[in-house]
Structures are given as C-alpha cells and as structure tokens.
Image: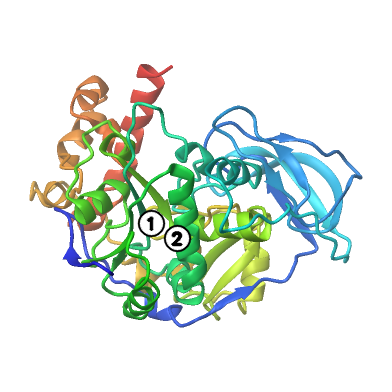
Amino acid sequence: MLKLISKKTFKGGVHPKEFKELTEHKVLEKFPEPDELVIPLSQHSGKDAIPLVKKNDKVKVGTLIAKEDGFISAPIHSPICGTVTSITKTFTFAGIQKSSIILKKDGLDEKDFLPPLDFETVSSEEIISRVKEAGIVGLGGAAFPTYVKLIPPPDKKIDMIILNACECEPYLTRDYRLVVERTEDLIKGLKLIMRASKVQRGIIGIEDNKQEAIELLKEHLVNHSEIELVVLKTKYPQGAEKMLIKAATGREVPPGKLPLDVGVIVQNVGTAISIFDAVVNGIPSIYAYLTVSGLGINEPKNLIVPIGTSIEDVIEYCGGMKENVRRIVIGGPMMGYAQFDLSTPITKAVSGILFLTDEELEVFPETNCLRCGMCVSVCPLNLTPVRLVRLIQNKRFEEAAILNVALCMECGTCAYSCPASIPLVQWLRLGKKWVFQNRFN
C-alpha cells in the first residue's frame, strides 16, 4: 500500500523565483555527437582517473579510456567512436587545469558496452561491481563515486535509501523530466540501490511544485509497498542531504557527521537512472543529463549530452545566446560556477547551463552590514554567517573554525537574503579553505 507523507520541510531556507516554466515541459533531447570531445580525467570527487589510451588509439562508444586511481575515484568511458588526438591540460568548469583526453569523431557507430545483467536475479555484489565498472558518480552535484556509498562501513547500520527528486535549485528541470519520462526505470533503479545496500525500505522525496511527477509516482508505486512517496514543501535547499533527511524522516544528521550515521543513504534521480542503464542495458556513464535555461538563451532545452561536449556546442544547438547575457553558470544559480571559457567541457555531474541576464541577476552594490540577522534566520545549518564572515575578514580563522565554518555547505541562502548584498558565501569559502589547509593537511 502506498504511503504518502505530505508537506514536510526543514527550518530555515529561502524561496527564490523558480523560472522552471522555461523548461519543465521540454522533453529530454539526445544531443548529436560533436566532432571533438574534451574528456577531463577529473569527472568525480577523489583522485583523477589514470588514462589507458594514447595518441592515435581508436575507441568505440563505451570503451574504457581511463581507470580509477584508488578507492575514491571512478573510471571513464568514451561517449563516441573516434581517435585519441592528444592528452593535454584543459580547464574544468571550476576553473582548474586538469589533464584531458581529446577525442575526434570518426563517424562510425560501434559500441563497446558492458554485458547486460538480469534485473530480477542480479545480486548485491554484482550491482556494486557494475556501478563501479560503469564509472557512475552521484549526479546531485558532488560527483562522489556511487559504488563507495553502496558499501558503508560495517559499523554503520543502514535501514533506508532516500531518492532525492527535490531538484530545489531554480531553473533546473532535468530530474523532473527523468521522473516523468522514465518513471518505471527510476523505481527499478531505486530497487537496485536497495538490493545493493541490502535495505528493505525506500523513500522518494519530491517537492510539491512537481505535480505531474507526483501523480505518476503515486500511480507506479501502488504495488511497491516497500517504497514511500514523501511530498515536501517547495523551499531551497530542500534537496540538500541533511535537509531532506530531516524533512522526510525526522532524523537529524549531527554536525560533522554523514547520512550514514543516521542509517540513511541518499541518491539522486539521475544516479538511479544511470544505475538502471548500467545494470540492465550495460551502458556506462557517458552522458550528462542537463537543463539549458535562462532568459539569455534562445531555445531553452533539457538535454542528454555526451560528456566532453563544450559549452559552445551546446549554445549553438540551443539557437545561440542573446546579446544581453550577463553571466553563464554551470549548475544552478545558487551553487553553480560562473564560466569564463566557452570551450569548457561538460562532465558527468553537470546538471545545467544557465544564461542569465541583468533582469534575473538583480545585482545591487554592496553596502555595510545592517545587522538584521536575516542570514542567521535562513541558514539551514543554524550557523551565524554574519559573525563568521566578520572573523574571516579580520583573519581570525581559528575562531571561525571553532564556530564551525567548515560545516557550511555553501548553499547561498545567506547571500541571497542579505539586504546589504555582501558576498557571504565567498567569504565563508575562504574560511573553509583555511580550515582544510591547516587542520587536515
């Protein structure tokens, strides 16, 4: 029997204008193969992958071109048939230079996928092995190697998997489209995650602004009593792991701890779909599901893009950008990365490319702090951004560390709500950098 929990939420957060109407009804389109791809060896959290190919090597769609380097790393596969033209340094969307494999398309359509496994009989060990072999990473933003999350330490007793379908960032609708277009595959992906982790209970958490997706999930979950649908109030950052767990289950992840510490594993919608495709269809992680949106792009779309495709190629496919574009952002507007180079390649966990105009950015000059306390009231982690920033500005990093600056998840709620337009997140990021350099090195 389907259990429907209604309208839960968390303390704090903000309600930015959504702009989801630009793409929420745009079906996912398969992006045509570009002539050239730039595949960074850093597609994930942890160590960069190690290249297995060299210049002039031929590859097929799905060929393993780089292997993982250690436990926290992930292999990389070719999204096209073609030739390796070089291995060189290029910039990632985070503005960091990394080694990349350059592939040139040859026009063939030869595949080198993994052998499909039977959904009904595949074992826990086989699922974990396939997730690792396919190079699947978390598609919620952090790009953490997914197989690692499926094998928690023996002392962590996991009793629940939460599938995150909140997609709380403005503009982004790729998760929504995946739920609507691939509802049954999504549920099977969740069940594969549950089987891999040997967990009997699953939850799908989704915000109440996604009514069509909610109705489809209710319809498809009728005969899946082990999975609950949790409808949550629309609020940013409802999709952050700790906020989602608190709202959906009442469990609170202590400061400095992980979801594992309260018996929960959280996975993203796109991750579940990728797991289904890898297990049932043998397709490795070679595509990024992403939303192209903003008032500055001529044809907003939801796309399935080969990893390594440049922002420039995406712009051309979407009809070009308008003259009044002020900022191009990879990811969502709250936590994304502003771009300076249109040749930057798409990686596995990229969720969107936004083309923002002055109308959307609403940029105001910075003024002195008003001591209004707004940043404190909206922080979902109960931090005191104004005090932390004051300490960081005065280089009192040790005191900021004592007040838990390292716990900040850089969600941007404080900066968004600040009437003085102080770049609070940038200052907090500076403080976190000091902590990690001095406490963990």
Q: Give percent across and percent down for residue 136.
A: 58, 48
Q: Nearer the viewer, residue 412 or 426?
A: 412
> Does the rendering let one see residue 346?
no
User: Residue 90 placed where, x, y %?
Assistant: 68, 43
Residue 210 located left or right of residue 67: left
The part of the image, by quadrant, that contains residue 397 is top left
The answer to which of 303 and 333 lies nearer the viewer is 303
Mark 1 vs 2, N-terminal side: 1
Residue on which disc 2 sits: 269
Q: Name which residue lies at 53% across and 65% down.
A: 290
Residue 301 to residue 260: above or below: below
Name which residue type carries label 1.
Leu
Query: Quarter holding the N terminus?
Result: bottom left
Does residue 257 appear left or right of residue 380 in this picture?
right
Going by the numbered disc 2, the residue's amino acid type is Val
Give the labeled residue for mark 1. Answer: 163
Please report the residue visible at 29 percent of the width from the left and 31 percent of the height from the top.
406
Q: Is residue 3 left or right of residue 167?
A: left
Residues packed near mark 2 inside 10 Å, few (<14), some (14 to 19) or many (20 plus): many
